Image (tube, grey):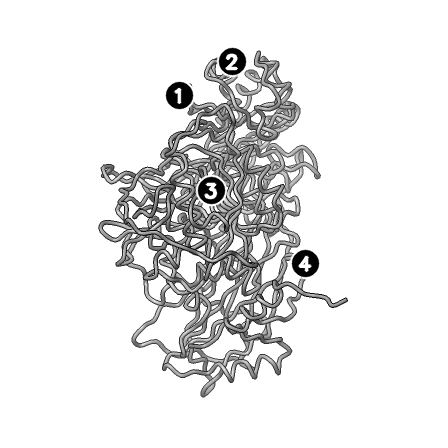
Amino acid sequence: MNELLQLKGRFEQKSSSGRPGSPKLLANQIVSEKKISKLKKELEELKEYWLNISYFEGALISVTYVDVVAKSRRMRELFKKNSRIQPNDCVVGAKFIDKTSTEKQHVITYYVDLDVLDESINTLNIVASLLIKDFNGEISTEKLNSISDRTDNYEPGIIARTKFLQAIVDISSIENFAIPKNEFDELETSIISIFDTKVPTSELLKRVGLNVPDYRVIDETTILLTPDQLEILNEKAPYLISMATTDLSKLDTQNFEIFDSGHRMTIPSPVDEPVVGVIDTMFDTSVYFSEWVTFQDKVNADIPINSTDYEHGTAVSSLIVDGASINPELDDGCGRFRVKHFGVARGSKFSSFSILKSIKEIVADNRDIKVWNLSLGSALEIQKNFISPEAALLDKIQYEFDVIFVIAGTNKRVSDKARMKIGAPADSINSLVVNAVDKDNKPATYSREGKVLSFFNKPDISYFGGDGKNKIRVCMPTGEYFVAGTSFAAPWIARKIAYLIHKIGLSREVAKALIIDSAISWSKPNSSMNLIGYGVVPQKIEDVLNAQDDEIKFVISGESIMFDTYNYNLPVPVVDDKHPYIAKATLCYFPKCSRNQGVDYTNTELDIYFGRLNGQKIITVNDNKQNDNVSLSETDARGLYRKWDNIKSIIEYVKPNGRAKKAYGDGLWGFSLKTKERLNNGDGRELRFGIVVTLKEMKGINRISDFISQCSMRGWLVNRIDIQEMIDIYNVAEGEINFED
């Protein structure tokens, strides 16, 4: 086995040199006066409607685009207030609707001033009249682009030339304008998010006739309403409701069979082992490993607790503390961990609202904990157009704090034969979401599936969670039991993450990337990513860290400071003027997310370019052309290159007749990370990232010494990660120091 290498070097930074070009239509388009007049009439009707609404001063308008639109193809002229406040600054929500069985459309909701609406109507009127006057009622791609390129010297006269062109380009992407449609009719749903109308939520609700106390406000636009209050809101102002979800959720935690093994365990006292945070049901302090667990009861004192409420939480913590001893056949090599356990829920039903409040407080008060296990999950399915409040909170916490959550992918009952989407909070984008497999690495019978927001790969990875006759041993209040579920797959991953962060000293970004990368095979997976994520994580921690003898595996990390973060100085071994390698790379980062943006949830995109260097151009491993000014739909960019995803996986699969790659110049490879902002507010600045790269020699030859030597000559600081050495360092660092008088 080859040891993992940690490369430390300098990433260069540069600003974007590109400027928005002149407005142009996509190929083979025609924009007609008839379509413009239709859109103008819709805006006029919307203006009349909103003039009669007194709850706020502006207008909420949902724009249905013709397809899934990139930021660059959203409206840039219509709804523009001035040079500082662009249409994109007025977005308050986004969702997808089905155009066909395979195609989707963006529906983006804007909040605009009425005078801006007036100006947009006026612009449409002028453009329509010009098309009739000068273009026989319609304009084609060829004609508009010739005006844009100035091969045609047409000047509209009554409107600025660029404004004229951009308005037409805007119109080409729009299908219709409408009032936001409330899709939530069930009055049992009570966690409500409303569109941002620049009016404080409490004040806005008072205008509607609702008095909501401050303690029921989750964030700026999300509140807890009773069924009666929701009925009033739904009657008076249904257009305000952007998202709705059920507060009381039934846990999926009882979807497993339990057998008493009759075996008792013992454990030594803890010393200085790393601490993992557990948020779950209650913990029984009488169990054999209780000395390893610090327990805090966070359940409301008014809620009655019974004996079953201690089972799930105690079982989860038993795996994190002593899983390898309880299950010697599943020994991962990670040792034992201490646990700080917070009981926030009962074993049957729980309030999402109360758990949200608890998690905020728990993480804020325990900043020393870096790894959190959350094996609670809702039996209800996630929504397709927005992230659950629970997941959004976890994403916010992980963006703001240097922590990572490992979350169970949730279970369905064995009796449920139909496919079932994962439940909250397994839709958390920044968290590491774990599904379960059986002993043959096949999806467990109780597996629920992604995707999230029709796009994000969730679950992220899978691990053995028990199934059929092969289950996992845990400790519960009355003894040792056999269980199965994603709840019991997640703790094994939490152990590995804690090992990588605390015992090896890696950042959470690199640790997450290593876990995901270890699950990615050199051959195409047989199971659906919707069920297993990127793959099954190996049992042994050394298989996560180390590489095969014919592989070179290294990690690098850094921060995105400017538009382009790059290094063109990676010396991949050359043999006979060729690189005899196939490659894979995994990138992870923790972006700020905006729940009120609906399906456009992540605020920052890190677009990765990795491969051979030909001059100043990277010949990318995955043929990434997003920055090459080629025609590429937003759907293709998201599907092929994971645009807006915070996990990027690049891989060349093993081919029997694969050929070595041509080496250019000095045989250097390079990285380039292009930072893109969805909301123009600098959320991507100083965003940390971790990258794992594996190079596999095509003929099975070990060339790691050559690679290390060349890296050192090129100024890289190369650190071999020797597991035992790192453990020894950790033990010394954490040991007590005795000072003599």
Residue under circle 2? 236
The residue at 62%/46% (across/down) is 400
> In terms of depth relative to the viewer, which is nearer, 589 or 144?
589
Q: Is residue 600 above or below residue 705?
A: above
Front: mark 1 or 2: 1
Labels 1 and 2 touching (C-beta < 8 A): no
First of labels 4, 2 by sequence position: 4
Give the mark nearest the N terminus, 3 or 2. 2
Q: Residues within 10 Å of mark 2 (few under 14, many from 20)?
A: few
The answer to which of 217 and 521 lies nearer the viewer is 217
The amino acid marked with disc number 4 is: Ser
CB under 8 Å between discs 4 and 2: no
Residue at numbered disc 3: 285
Which labelled disc corresponds to residue 186?
1
**Disc 1 to disc 3, C-alpha distance:** 41 Å
Residue position for label 4: 15
Label 1 is placed on what type of residue? Glu
Nearer-N-terminus badge (1/2): 1
Q: Nearer the viewer, residue 2 or 611?
A: 2
Looking at the rendered image, the disc whose residue lies closer to the viewer, 3 or 2, is 3
Give coordinates of residue 542: x percent, y percent: 43, 68
Circle 3: residue type: Thr
* SS at mark 1 in the image: loop
